[in-house]
Image: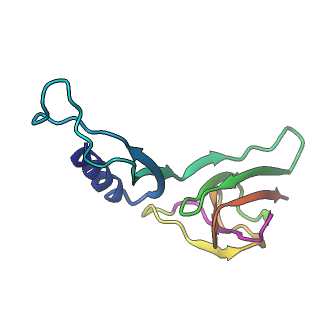
Amino acid sequence: MLLKAFHLLKAAIALPALSLVVLPITLNAVATSTSPPGKTLNLLPSLENPVLLAQRSRTQRIRFKPGESSASIRTAVVRGTRDIYLLRAQKGQIMTVKIESLENNALFDVAAPLNQSGQRRVLKQETMVWSGKLPDTGDYQIAVGTIRGNATYKLWVEIR
């Protein structure tokens, strides 16, 4: 069982897009092949061991309601992960993005659409308010993260 947990930990650490959350569990008893029949061997009675669970960043597309040019999203992001939003926009439009969080600990980055080599140019990094004229047509990326702890936030995006 410990070997299996080690292999799960090893696999989780190898994935760069994941962060780890430690949750305590209690191992009451472990039966082994060397235990007498019908007997359970208590190797680690009530010892709390961490179990690592991967938290994934999530990606969502922002779509405005018909006739509207803005949208807001209320949700939360877990420390070590990012909420990534894609928004289709045209070259020359003005995008405005604002974020509010309960503890002022949520920030966002804005990146231009993918270029021919598959890279995104960062237009603004780690900010709470941004507005700018868009350089290209395509899917812009807004990545929300935290500077400390988890963050409950409201993200507001407008295109005009």
Give the percent coordinates (x, y) of residue 139.
62, 54
User: The N terminus is located in which quarter?
Assistant: top left
Q: Quadrant of residue 134?
A: bottom right
143 vs 133, left or right, is left
Query: Most extreme residue toward the right, as rendered?
Result: 67
Q: Is residue 41 magenta?
A: no
Q: Quadrant of residue 130?
A: bottom right
Q: Is residue 104 magenta?
A: yes
Provide the residue span drawn in magenta.
102-114
Give the percent coordinates (x, y) of residue 27.
36, 44
Query: Does the rendering let one see residue 122?
Result: yes
> Which residue is painted at 26% across and 39% down in the image?
30
> Which residue is painted at 12% across and 30% down in the image?
36
> Which residue is painted at 53% across and 66% down in the image?
120
Give the percent coordinates (x, y) of residue 95.
78, 64
Return the residue nearer the eye: 4 or 136.
4
Query: Most extreme residue toward the left, as rendered?
Result: 34
> Which residue is painted at 61% across and 55% down in the image?
84
Give the percent coordinates (x, y) of residue 19.
46, 59
Return the residue nearer the eye: 72 or 28.
28
Instruction: Count the marks.
Output: 0
User: The C terminus is located in which quarter?
Assistant: bottom right
